[in-house]
Image (tube, rainbow, N blue to C red):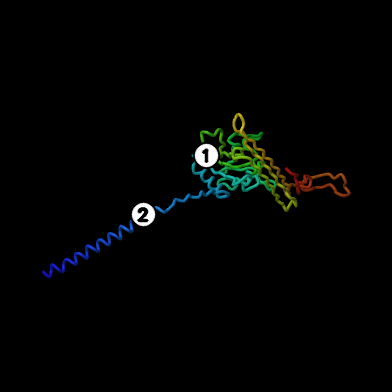
Amino acid sequence: MKTQVSARPFALKLTVTALMGAGLLSSASVWAQEAAAKTEPTDAATVVVTGVKASLIKSLAIKRTSDQVVESIVAEDIGKLPDNNVVEALQRVTGIQVTDRAGGEVGTLSIRGLPDVQTTWNGRTIFTASGTQVALQDIPSTLVRQIDVYKTRDASQLETGIAGQVDVKSLRPFDFKGQKISLSARETYLEPANKANPQLSAMFSNRWQTGIGEVGALVNLSEVKTKYRNESVTPGAMVPFTSPNAAEVPAGYTPLQRIFDNNIWTPGTH
């Protein structure tokens, strides 16, 4: 009898403890549901990457998605390619070698050591009397929004050069949402020539809705003056000559560069 009486309170205590634990669990679950109901969704902010990083991201995207081996230079903004002209900008591309440095500017380029490079303007073939490789140093960087260098061929490209193809893409009115005006001015000083070289550019672009659809126009003007000094000495063989004034300069032998004076050559502007 004593054993049965002592066992009942213990069982009752276990039951009460179990009920209290279940009540705590149920209240905790109810509290969690109320907290979740009070949470309001927040709108995620859109992050727009611009500037130099945006141009690098676009260049990598072009290289990644292209079926060919291509390198691209994208201007971060209007007229902000890293150099003054197209050739100087292309010397930063892997596999491009620039040659013919005359007057402080590079003139031609080669791809992987091969000089036969075809140049296109917005995908269209352009050529001069000397061939399909135009003078890219005459194209200011303010006129260009993107440069693509193709190192391999594709069936969609006609008459690609042996070395590859350089496609220069210019600014277009539909690249902008509406009216756009850009002005830029810079000046470089060349110490040997003791001259300042101004570089001016202006761009105006706009789009209009007409009866035949939307039309656009873009005008881009650029002026670059380069004054440089090139000093060179051309040695040559001793050649005979006859002086018209024997008293001052007697006849005899003189180096070839004395007859054809090319010691100092200072060209004009171009």
| Vertical arrangement, residue 196 with respect to residue 144, above or below | below
Mark 1 lies on a secondary structure that is loop
Type of residue at label 1? Thr
Q: If the image is split into quadrants, where does the N terminus sit?
A: bottom left
Q: Nearer the viewer, mark 1 or mark 2?
A: 2
- Where residue 246 sits in the image (x, y, percent)? 87, 47
- The numbered dot on residue 152 is 1
- Where residue 78 sits in the image (x, y, percent)? 62, 44
In the foreground, 175 or 264:
175
Contact (Cβ within 8 Å) of mark 1 with mark 2: no
- In the displayed orientation, state which residue is furthest to the left: 1
Type of residue at label 2? Gln
- In the displayed orientation, state which residue is furthest to the bottom: 2
- The numbered dot on residue 33 is 2
In the foreground, 175 or 69:
175
- The numbered dot on residue 21 is none
Label 1 – label 2 distance at C-alpha: 62 Å
Q: Quadrant of residue 134?
A: top right
- Where residue 101 sits in the image (x, y, percent)? 66, 46
Q: Quadrant of residue 268?
A: top right
Q: Residue at x 52, y 39 (%)?
A: 152
Mark 2 lies on a secondary structure that is helix
Q: Residue at x 41, y 54 (%)?
A: 38
Can residue 258 be seen here? yes
| Vertical arrangement, residue 246 with respect to residue 127, above or below | below
- Where residue 166 sits in the image (x, y, percent)? 58, 40
| Mark earlier in primary sequence (1, 2) | 2
Q: Residue at x 56, y 41 (%)?
A: 149
